[in-house]
Amino acid sequence: MLVKVVSENFDIPNSHKLEVAKANGRYSSIEKLFTMAPDDVIEEVTKSGLRGKGGGGAPCGPKWKLMPKDDPRPSYLIVNGDESEPGTFKDRQIFQYDPHLLIEGIICSSYAMNAHDAYIYVRGEYKWFIDRLNEAIKEAYDAGIIGEKVMGHDYRMDITVHRGGGAYICGEKSALIESLEGKRGHPRLKPHQKECEWFFDNPATVNNVETIATVPFIVEKGYEAYTAYGTEKSPGTMLFAMSGPVKNPGVYELAFGNKMIDVINKIGGGMKEGKKLKAVIPGGSSCPILTAKEVEEAVLDYESMWDIGSTLGTGGMIIIDEDMSMIDVAKNLIEFYHHESCGQCTPCREGCGWIDKILAKVLAGEGTKEDLDTILDVCETMNGKTICVFAPAVKDIIKSIIIKFRDEFVKEFK
């Protein structure tokens, strides 16, 4: 079941060091890259069906095509490493075990979009991973891999790491850019038409760490090597994470299309201590929860997860066993979202706090059936009425827990 596209070097000792990285294939795509026209690189990525692996799953190639041609302003690549969602911890594997793969991906992606400056925005708490990434970037500069000439080619490439301030909302791409510009991390209103992002009024593209780290494989081996994995509509692979009471929690690279229950049992080793599976939040904490019965049918690709009423998200599976209270789960999550709401939009700011207070009331044994109706009403008030998808994500997880596990809440009522 395991495959090796992004994770190929993860198990090699000292794989983060340049000498070891180069001996194991890093930067081998660069020579081929500079035999290709930038538009050809974009076309290859488009044909590969590569999709954003930061949660949205949007096709990568068409996104790159939104960058304006022949614009006199500089273009920028911004790599989103603000991995702050509960249950999501895959991008840090790349920082830790193969940072040179990310640098190689930045070179390939920047060349395709005529960007000479890239920023990697990393979650503020990832101090250790940031230090390792900066060490790799220094190695690349010292070796002439990046800088005024990329490995001797007439192409300048500069990379800067920006450490975030620890705000979950800055994982949203426009809030990330606001933060990168030195402003408060508030999401921006979206334009009516499709267009690129704007960094100090210059064209920019924001992509997730794993997405960029996948590009060298496609450049070097061609799109058909990538589409050989996965499904027709969800081609390729993804780093899937498992946390919770399974015997082998961790991060594993798998092709899209595997059954979730097989991954939990065969890769995760099954449940600990003979406990029964109760539920799974499939892709980080903002995805609608799945019951144990739904997990039996769930398939790990974008379309299948939509069909079953959830989303693949970042592939971070949060496993929940039979002894875990779903009221505690909901309260734990809403505390996080209440704390992390940026406060820009009233439905989100007030809705998160309102739900948090009601769930505290339920846990104190003072809840009523009317309280559940109020929570569901607040969820609908939050959905689609804010600037970004933070509030709809809160609605998805809280509403799904209450609807699918309503009996647990009702048992606590007087």
Image (cartoon, grey):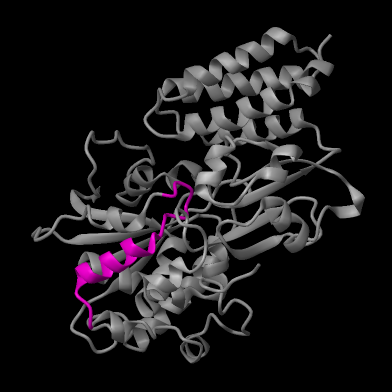
**Left or right, residue 6 beside residue 328:** left
Q: Position of residue 90 (x, y in %)?
A: 57, 60
- Residue at 31% over, 80% down: 146
Q: Is residue 193 visible?
A: yes
Q: Position of residue 354 (x, y in %)?
A: 59, 18
**Left or right, residue 173 beside residue 110:** right
Question: Which quarter shows the C terminus?
Answer: top right
The segment highlighted magenta reads 35-57
Question: Which quarter shows the N terminus?
Answer: bottom right
Q: Nearer the viewer, residue 2 or 176?
A: 2
Count of picture labels? 0
Q: Nearer the viewer, residue 232 or 195?
A: 232
Based on the displayed image, in which of its 4 quarters is residue 172 positioned? top left
- Residue at 51% over, 73% down: 5
Residue 253 magenta: no
Q: Position of residue 370 (x, y in %)?
A: 68, 7
Q: Does residue 135 sit above or below 73 in this rendering?
A: below
**Left or right, residue 40 beside residue 206:** left
Q: Nearer the viewer, residue 124 or 284?
A: 284
The residue at the far right in this view is 274
Residue 45 magenta: yes
Q: Does residue 280 sit above or below 24 in this rendering?
A: above
Q: Is residue 103 visible?
A: no
The residue at the far front in this view is 232
Q: Does residue 253 sit above or below 173 in this rendering?
A: below
Q: Position of residue 52 (x, y in %)?
A: 42, 54
- Residue at 49% over, 30% down: 392
